[in-house]
Image (cartoon, helix red, strand yellow):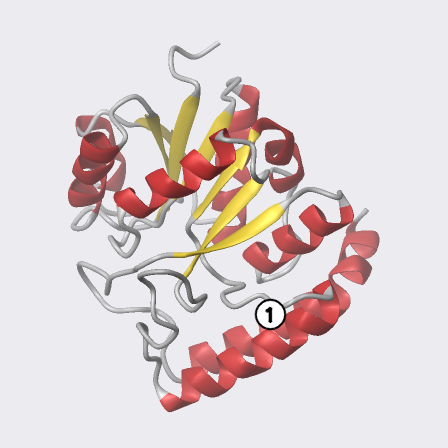
């Protein structure tokens, strides 16, 4: 059993520039939590930076993609015996203070999983605090409609990478992902399992270093991928089983 009951994992691919700040912020806001970096076959110094920052490091021998990194993070948390698990991205967009709030909700038993949302309104969080480009706004609108149809309830930010989960949810979220939209696939699994998911308004930042990979055609491709996951993820899973 680990000394801490909580771990925060970070999927990372070639993020040596931004990772030190992320690790320092987590240490300041969540000093009692362990930190796990899933190094997705990085070709830079990501693994070394993570180890120097006090994180547990699990490195892939090659780049496997985000869906493999997410599954590995939840699987490691479950197999290592943690009661609670948080996830943030390595690019500095997710404030550790917001993750601490998500973990508090899960610890308090009000939900099994808390998802940080850029678009959900709430006290101190205006609905328009994050203004996407017209193209992304159109795509987000499509995703929200598709999520509402699939889940039977509104969901504002289905691709959010900030989350907190309890031990029960870890096993569900650790299974390998078969679609290109792992966060959406996880939501579908959690719903089928009858677990309680709460979408929580949070503030997010622009990435600290580099540029977002979701621009132009890639952003449009993401929309198609997510909607495909909503429609066909069950078929994909049966095909691979």
Which one is nearer the viewer's eye here, 51 or 200?
200
Tag 1, which secondary structure? helix
Which residue is at 28% across, 57% downward? 93
Which one is nearer the viewer's eye here, 222 or 45?
222
- How many numbered circles does the render carry? 1
| Residue 65 in sight from this viewpoint | no
Which residue is at 45% across, 66% downward? 120
Q: Is residue 137 left or right of residue 197?
A: left
Examine the rendered structure and indicate whether residue 195 appears above or below residue 84.
Answer: below
Residue ranking furthest to the bottom: 134
User: Which residue is denoted by mark 1 in the rendering?
Assistant: 226
Residue ranking furthest to the front: 123
Examine the rendered structure and indicate whether residue 139 appears above or below residue 205.
Answer: below
Find residue 118 and report its horizontal and vertical position in percent.
Answer: 39, 65
Find residue 179 and report its horizontal and vertical position in percent.
Answer: 64, 60
Which residue is at 28% across, 43% downward? 96
Q: Is residue 171 left or right of residue 139?
A: right
Which one is nearer the viewer's eye here, 114 or 12?
114
Examine the rendered structure and indicate whether residue 228 appears above or below residue 241.
Answer: below
Around disc 1, counting alpha carbons within 10 Å, would you say few (fewer than 14), some (14 to 19), or many (20 or more)? many
Find residue 223 and report its horizontal and vertical position in percent.
Answer: 55, 77
Which one is nearer the viewer's eye here, 98 or 6?
98
Q: In which quarter of the image is residue 112?
A: top right
| Residue 135 in sight from this viewpoint | yes
Which residue is at 40% across, 28% downward? 7
Q: Quadrant of residue 203?
A: bottom left
Find residue 67 and report its horizontal and vertical position in percent.
Answer: 53, 51
């Amino acid at each position: 059993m680990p000394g801490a009951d909580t771990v925060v994992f970070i999927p990372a691919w070639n993020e040596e520039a931004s990772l030190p700040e992320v690790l320092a912020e987590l240490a300041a806001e969540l000093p009692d939590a362990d930190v796990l970096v899933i190094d997705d076959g990085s070709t830079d110094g990501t693994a070394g930076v993570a180890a120097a920052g006090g994180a547990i490091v699990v490195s892939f021998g090659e780049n496997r993609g985000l869906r493999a990194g997410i599954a590995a993070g939840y699987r490691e948390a479950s197999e290592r015996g943690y009661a609670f698990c948080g996830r943030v991205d390595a690019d500095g967009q997710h404030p550790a203070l917001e993750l601490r709030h998500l973990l508090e909700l899960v610890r308090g038993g009000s939900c099994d999983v808390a998802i940080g949302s850029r678009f959900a309104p709430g006290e101190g969080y205006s609905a328009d605090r994050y203004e996407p480009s017209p193209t992304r706004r159109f795509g987000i609108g499509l995703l929200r409609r598709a999520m509402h149809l699939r889940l039977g309830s509104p969901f504002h930010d289905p691709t959010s990478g900030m989350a907190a989960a309890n031990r029960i949810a870890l096993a569900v979220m650790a299974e390998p992902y078969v679609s290109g939209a792992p966060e959406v696939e996880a939501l579908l699994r959690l719903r089928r399992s009858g677990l309680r998911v709460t979408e929580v308004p949070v503030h997010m930042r622009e990435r600290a270093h580099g540029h977002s990979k979701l621009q132009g055609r890639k952003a449009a491709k993401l929309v198609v991928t997510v909607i495909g996951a909503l429609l066909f993820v069950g078929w994909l899973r049966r095909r691979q089983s």
